[in-house]
Image (cartoon, helix red, strand yellow):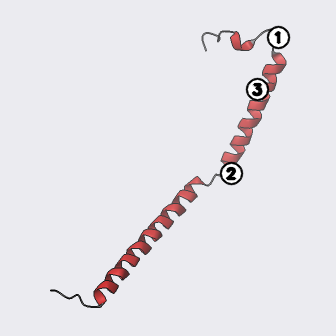
């Protein structure tokens, strides 16, 4: 029968804890990188607001210029565009 020295269990446990710590550190670094990439830039915000403004203006023009009694959804799309 082979008897293990008393520190064998402790050293194995310490190695496991160190491995888990390095895994947590790696995951933390990954999450920081992902968060940095996901941060919106100021120009993106300006372009998003401009796009919303243009979409609202286009909808307003479509409603304003629509002929009474004409359903624009049933009209065929113009050819050549």
| Left or right: where 18 falls relative to 51 | left
Point out the image quarter for the C terminus: top right
Which residue appears at 68% of the width and 51% of the height? 42
Which of these two is toward me, 55 or 71?
71
The number of callouts visible is 3
Can you say whether 40 is above or below 33 in the image? above
Which residue appears at 23% of the width and 87% of the height? 4
Rendering quarter of residue 73: top right
Location of mark 2 (residue):
42
Which residue appears at 45% of the width and 67% of the height? 26
Secondary structure beneath dot 2 equals helix
> Which disc number belongs to residue 46?
none
Location of mark 3 (residue):
58
- Within 10 Å of disc 3 (Cα), the crowding (few <14, some 14-19, many 20+) is few
| Left or right: where 73 falls relative to 67 | left
Going from the N terminus, do you reach mark 2 or mark 1 first? 2
Going from the N terminus, do you reach mark 3 or mark 1 first? 3
- Within 10 Å of disc 2 (Cα), the crowding (few <14, some 14-19, many 20+) is few
Can you say whether 65 is above or below 36 in the image? above
Residue 22: x, y in percent?
A: 42, 72
Q: Are marks 3 and 2 in contact (CB under 8 Å)?
A: no
Single out the mark in the foreground, 3 or 2: 3
Point out the image quarter for the N terminus: bottom left
Disc 3 from disc 2: Cα separation: 25 Å
Residue 32: x, y in percent?
A: 54, 63
> Which disc number belongs to residue 67?
1
Secondary structure beneath dot 3 equals helix
| Left or right: where 37 falls relative to 9 | right
| Left or right: where 64 falls relative to 37 | right
Disc 3 from disc 1: Cα separation: 16 Å
């Amino acid at each position: 029968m082979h008897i293990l020295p008393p520190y064998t269990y402790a050293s194995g446990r310490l190695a496991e804890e160190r491995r888990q710590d390095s895994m947590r550190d790696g995951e933390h670094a990954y999450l920081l990188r992902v968060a940095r990439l996901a941060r919106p830039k100021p120009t993106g915000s300006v372009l998003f607001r401009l796009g919303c403004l243009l979409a609202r203006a286009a909808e307003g023009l479509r409603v304003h210029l629509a002929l009474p009694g004409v359903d624009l959804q049933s009209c065929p799309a113009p050819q050549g565009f």
